Amino acid sequence: MLREKLAQKEFVVTMEVDPPRGADPWPVFTAIHDLADQLTAVNIADSPTAKLRMSPIALASLVQDRLRLETIFHLTCRDRNLLGLQAELLGAHALGVRNILTLTGDDPKLGDHPEASGVFDVDSKGLAQMAADLNQGQDYYGRELDNATDFFIGAVANPGMEDLSKEVGRVQEKIAHGVQFFQTQPVYSLEQVERFAAAANTDVPFIYGIMPVKSVKQAHYLNEHVPGVHVPDEMVTILEKDGAAGGMEYLCNLVQQLKPHVAGIHIFPMRQYHLAEQLIEVL
């Protein structure tokens, strides 16, 4: 299990999956079936970028049942009020889905239902605290539940943020609210990881994000438009010379460099699951 492997300092590999835009889960099963034995867990996103997708809790339960692959379900504060969030958590626990990634969530105006209301009764820290309270057998207002939950509570971090002290402050606040592990935005150098780990200075495990870059154009886009994500000049030069294949070779080398120093990697395959397989093979 993810929790036990992290506690025992075993290297873990997780991967991001978007639920289908429809009622059929089989495309997801097909996409990740061949990787199921090689992953520690798979993340199931919660209507990412505020676009309609299947329930992450329902899909997580199906993946665990059909593929025998542990899941980390995302839960955002965007779509549910205090009552709904707690109800979802209790239901997830009943289905055996115990790993949660707590997220504030994207504004609905950015997605395909711009007239939907964003709830945001709490943010990601409040959601983590809510899950931690349920683990203690009480609801949001401290009232006793019939049964306690046993969630393994995760959150996100961004090692590449320019104001590193501010990001470390966010990490510390999340830990204080019950977060037990982190998954990060994509990183592209060992030096970036080492700098962030030294600043964070915590025993809470971090699973570092790895995302393939296919072109120089994509690298420039990430550098210019995605806060905290920086593709270094060395990788851009390789992309200019050798294209996507060179970019993958760079990332495979990076994964090998990271392995002795981090709790694990979290792959963003961008629906190109064969690239995830290449990254896993080098481990």
Image (spheres, helix red, strand yellow):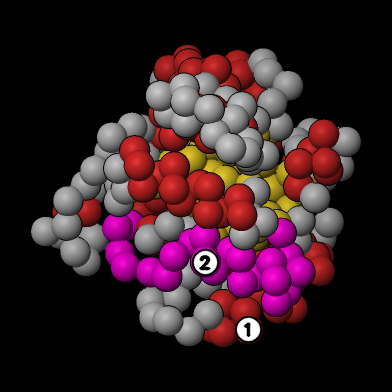
Q: Is 276 placed above or below 167 here?
A: below
Q: Is 220 placed above or below 4 here?
A: below
Q: Does the magenta run of residues contain 255?
A: no
- Camera-side mark, 2 or 1: 2
Q: Residue at x 88, y 36 (%)?
A: 8
Q: Residue at x 35, y 53 (%)?
A: 221
Circles 2 and 1: CB atoms closer than 8 Å: no
Label 2: state its secondary structure: helix
Label 1: state its secondary structure: helix
Q: Position of residue 2 (x, y in %)?
A: 76, 47
Q: Which residue is mark 2?
A: 58
Please, what is the three-letter code of the amino acid marked with disc 1?
Thr
Please state if 205 lies on the left or on the right of 109 as rendered: right
Figure disc tally: 2
Q: Position of residue 154 (x, y in %)?
A: 58, 38
| Residue 26 occupies quadrant | bottom right
